[in-house]
Amino acid sequence: MAKPLRIGMIGYGFMGRAHSNGYNRVANFFDLEYHPVLQAACARDAANAKAFADKWGYQSVETDWRKLVERKDIDAVDICTPNNLHKEIALAAAANGKMILCEKPLAMNAAEGEEMCRAVEKAKVLNTVWYNYRRVPAVTFAKQLIDSGKLGKIFHYRANFLQDWTISADLPQGGAALWRLDVAAAGSGVTGDLLAHCIDTAIWLNGGITTVNAMTETFIKERKHNLTGKVEKVGIDDACAFLARFENGSLATFESTRYARGHKALYTFEINGEHASIFWDLHDLHRLQYFDHRDQGTTRGWRSIHVTDGDHPYMGKWWVPGLAIGYEHSFVHQVADFLEGLAKGQPAGPTFRDALETQRVCDAVLASAQSGAWTNV
Amino acid sequence: MAKPLRIGMIGYGFMGRAHSNGYNRVANFFDLEYHPVLQAACARDAANAKAFADKWGYQSVETDWRKLVERKDIDAVDICTPNNLHKEIALAAAANGKMILCEKPLAMNAAEGEEMCRAVEKAKVLNTVWYNYRRVPAVTFAKQLIDSGKLGKIFHYRANFLQDWTISADLPQGGAALWRLDVAAAGSGVTGDLLAHCIDTAIWLNGGITTVNAMTETFIKERKHNLTGKVEKVGIDDACAFLARFENGSLATFESTRYARGHKALYTFEINGEHASIFWDLHDLHRLQYFDHRDQGTTRGWRSIHVTDGDHPYMGKWWVPGLAIGYEHSFVHQVADFLEGLAKGQPAGPTFRDALETQRVCDAVLASAQSGAWTNV
Amino acid sequence: MAKPLRIGMIGYGFMGRAHSNGYNRVANFFDLEYHPVLQAACARDAANAKAFADKWGYQSVETDWRKLVERKDIDAVDICTPNNLHKEIALAAAANGKMILCEKPLAMNAAEGEEMCRAVEKAKVLNTVWYNYRRVPAVTFAKQLIDSGKLGKIFHYRANFLQDWTISADLPQGGAALWRLDVAAAGSGVTGDLLAHCIDTAIWLNGGITTVNAMTETFIKERKHNLTGKVEKVGIDDACAFLARFENGSLATFESTRYARGHKALYTFEINGEHASIFWDLHDLHRLQYFDHRDQGTTRGWRSIHVTDGDHPYMGKWWVPGLAIGYEHSFVHQVADFLEGLAKGQPAGPTFRDALETQRVCDAVLASAQSGAWTNV
Amino acid sequence: MAKPLRIGMIGYGFMGRAHSNGYNRVANFFDLEYHPVLQAACARDAANAKAFADKWGYQSVETDWRKLVERKDIDAVDICTPNNLHKEIALAAAANGKMILCEKPLAMNAAEGEEMCRAVEKAKVLNTVWYNYRRVPAVTFAKQLIDSGKLGKIFHYRANFLQDWTISADLPQGGAALWRLDVAAAGSGVTGDLLAHCIDTAIWLNGGITTVNAMTETFIKERKHNLTGKVEKVGIDDACAFLARFENGSLATFESTRYARGHKALYTFEINGEHASIFWDLHDLHRLQYFDHRDQGTTRGWRSIHVTDGDHPYMGKWWVPGLAIGYEHSFVHQVADFLEGLAKGQPAGPTFRDALETQRVCDAVLASAQSGAWTNV
């Protein structure tokens, strides 16, 4: 009989839905010692909280996150708020001995992140950050291939995250749906929102980043602010590209923008090793492109691996070979791994400490974009 | 407050899981007047029934489907058994006034199907057959494009369903996981299992098929039978290809096999119209390829439409543009449409009567393969 | 010092250009004992003949092909006329002891083809038919893979040749550029023009075809005839699809049409074997898709082989890896192989006799489309 | 009657072949006032010069380029030597009043390039540099789309040129086939060899580059030198990536390497504009990917334009729609445009002056890689 893990959810937006779906589905597909119980959902507005709780099956609602983190019947707090609230909530949750599942990026900056790490480590509470792309089966499979040595020495890493949803100058900034454009709520633009994903994956797959050199741009300088009703300066980066070097000697380019027409969520990465290369693309997330130089010469070619077989990561839990799963399943997998880590006493990554490393790279990127100089992480 | 629709599920295999997932998830994403309640699961073996019920949340179990279809607390019966039981269960369920959701193909043959249609129509119970691919968003979108007239007069229809899982001569036939290879349980091989999907989609998109000319092949003539333990003749078709003509004057080729190395579930279709063409592929199910001759000449090209925008069919219910959903969502959509049909009194297709038409084509295909002659549907 | 092979070219259209380019370029890239000399070009209209000869460097012109085939200073006759002239010219050329390079299809029908075979075999003159796709490097490479046994037992062959250039009802038939729509000049429509290519490749790669079952359609029943100025019945097939069985036990589908919007010259074939499959596509002719089941399980995938390496067929003669060649090079290769066959006394295929086999299949296809019955080749 | 343009070719390697093929073929496909005559080929080794001249039809040979550039019967000099000879030859050719067609990059650095520009401008001789990719039809078509305003304001430019041929540490540097690895002959590694192509295209399509920030790497530090027989330090850059800003406000990333397993000559570029985006890839050079946001919403998608129609740039000269041409044709086109420029008195780009701009960017890139700082062009 599975043991309950009682979840308190703070936030009810896109990520609130994605995480809730992860909690709701995991038991149908994974055999686990623990099962999530949707204990309480929290939103400042009572009606929003109620509607969200009804939709997803949360048993109660709160309108003050401070109350939620103090509730005795909550085992784990899920932080799905804008970035500027992560630290405060996490510190309170840790102080109350709650496990924490925090949306990415970990914090507004590395200093906040360091404080959060110290808090959870002092409180000895299980913690994780929702860098969900690690658990897309094709990405997890990429990790297996690299760890098995198939790529050999790595020469190059290349990652992009391209979108096109903020090109219109008429789009306002701030408020519920658009806090990602408001620097006060988000901390940064594409760097924290999108490149943070790329950096987390990169560190996981290819090790530490030592130094970076970046440029950023804000194409639309002013937008109406939803909270003030006034046209205000836009403080976030619309686009950011940076060069980097890894500890293993490989070179990297990273780029993200919300001004790339035709791309909705085109997160891609490519790794070139001495023996083999891999390429992945979020728009066709169930495929991994793989080139192995050790294949017989004339038949060498990029292999389009449809990562849907039973012996591919996570896929034995789902349907049959050839049938694709989607974006949302990465969250189900993260829930499953979190619960398994809880049962085994071996925390599943990325922990706050892991995510802090990504935060440090983001900080270095933004500092380099200001100074124009190579900046060590 | 949503009204319950109490489901009695018969079967616990691949399709039992897929349908159950549809019932479990629909309320998290769709706003509906009815919500499914998993009332009872039925399997001959009590342990199997119990395990399945626990996994998916069915509130009770039965080991005799006859009991299940008679239970007063069941509103709708879901038939997920091998094909040879569809008719008997459907007739009993209809006689008890139950709505019926039946796995495809409808029956072992058109004669059985006709009997089933008469039964549900006489009982006036809502009925549907799980030809789920109609509700992959890209396929539904193809239907919208055709209905809007964008393709113009249709010249060609081309559909394949290619797999490679039965190539080994060591694979036995019959029993729980392999009833699809046993002609006594399945009725036919790829014709009823895979081409039935292609035919359902084709009729839906392109209208009635008038005449067919087919060939079939059984590459492995004998296999060990799991139920008898003896090597027995294989009665199913391993491969089937047929030429066809539609009522609208278009020509078609259809092909299915389980002997196409490298293809797991490659269901593809292409339609060539006077003005435009479309192509779809289950392995990349969130894309629709679309060519429009009315585009400006030099910039004409096949458009790879990533069917993940909010104004694409069903997609407004899920995540944000660019984020793909998968195979299983087609069943969620079918549940949603069934429930909406129930609420509005407008049954969602395909009904038993719709599915009977597909059955007639299958019968004609198998007859033609025997006779070698063009056979009218 | 290379020996001259003096060419007499009859015709000056698309194929006249493609062959002339083959003759002109071969010596720059291949080291051969013979080199083509463009001795004479023949066209009924003197101005056309002169313009063509000037463009390509033919040293003289003729307006009567009978004169050309009798000239002592001609070693080989290249027949690029409409199909209805192939037989008569070939018989005369053979009678004059000329080598013959004849455009495909060999003849209007197998009876004519048989007569042509007997003529060249009696005259003992080297002969070939321009089924040029055999010599696209990726196709030649496919042949090597098959011959090496990599595919194992073959289960399926699948070929299409799709175009869209005759959809408009305003397009006339007959005359210089449009003789392919005039049954009197072409003999048939897509069957002889496009499927003949598919059949030649298929027989080369997969062995003999034993029996076929076909359907044809003429979507536009009447068109203005350029030669008479009157609206006349269209006698060719606009579309043709057929089922087939090969001697090796494999099943096939073939389809061709000029009514597939979005496809210009989409000749594709796929072969599914016990161990491996291959797929090729004329629109991306420098790639061969290859799936090998014997690859390690989790890394299996369709390989996109960029057939441009020095150890790929013919490619060592051209540029460097990664740099593609195009359509026209297949003719250069055929010239090179013809000349090498001449030097070695080992005729390069396809000979007239090889091409006759394709003609027999075409005849069976057209007969089956008439009768509706399976027809043996 | 076409007027002759008598070519003196210096060099006989890969580019000597590619240019010679351009000269030999142009008259078969283009109607031009001038036609190239292969007057003389020059190589230091007489046997090499003779073999090359025989292969391509040059009428005479020289072993001293100084003699060649002084010959009265030469109208234009084609410089296909290693980069370190470009300047000296160009200056001498200009002094003798010869037109000059010079391989890229223009020179070892911008200072040399400036000197060369002054020389040809003083001598008033027609001059061009073989940045051939401008004349791949899909690239020329991209230029047309941009110039027509279809993309609108440009936000991003992204170019890569990836190869994998120098990964082995056993590969020596220097000498005939490997001068590109010898810094004394080449001046730089991938920057001058590959990024120069990317930069030329970028400036042509998107205007001037104002500032860059680069990193370079030499993965193999020492290689045997073919000329000395000793292991020597490698002076070239194996890889180079840089950030850039254009005058039009757009941001760019450029990357090139010879250490990207699986890529032979993967030159790609993507441009993201306000209204539309384009993507091109040398490995499938006959396709242009095009996304137009102004397409009707639900049917938007990346269009795979097969740039083979008669109304696509240059394609009316070749075959019929759907039939691809290859890499070498870009040189034929450049010859055709050079000859047309000569006839019309309107020099075809890129001129030496145009190519100097690319050289300045290369210099800035290499300087930035040294200093670590943003460097203005």
Image (cartoon, coloured by chain):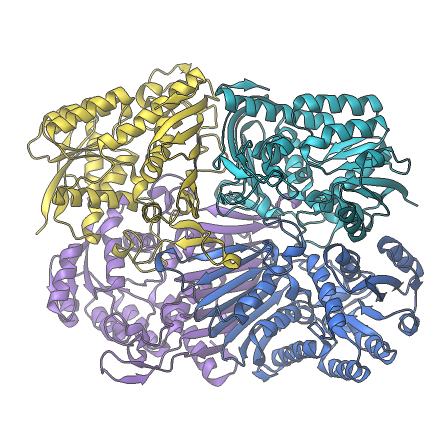
Chain colours: A yellow, B purple, C blue, D cyan
**Closer to the camera, C115 or C241?**
C115
Seen at 24% across and 73% down, the residue is: B91
Residue ranking furthest to the left: A72
Seen in the picture, residue D133 relative to A216 is either above or below; the reply is below
Residue D264 screen position, x and y as percent: 55, 46
Image position, residue A195 (x, y; %):
38, 31
- Residue D246 visible within the image: no
Give the answer, above or below, for where A76 lies relative to C45: above
Query: Which quadrant would the C terminus of chain C be assigned to in this image?
Result: bottom right
Is residue A300 or residue B338 the one in the foreground? A300
A353 left or right, relative to C17: left
Judge left or right: residue A78 versus residue C368: left
**Residue A42 visible:** yes
Q: Position of residue C73 (x, y in %)?
A: 91, 69
How many marks are shown on the rendered structure? 0
Of residues A276 and B373, the one nearer the viewer is A276
User: Where does the image place residue B154, in percent across and percent down from the top left?
Assistant: 57, 60
Instruction: Name the residue located 38 percent from the left edge and 42 percent from the top edge.
Output: B323
Residue shown at 77% from the left, 21% from the top: D118
B231 versus D226 height, above or below: below
Q: Is residue C11 left or right of residue B170?
A: right
Quarter where residue A249 is shown = top left
Give the quarter of the figure containing the N terminus of chain C. Answer: bottom right
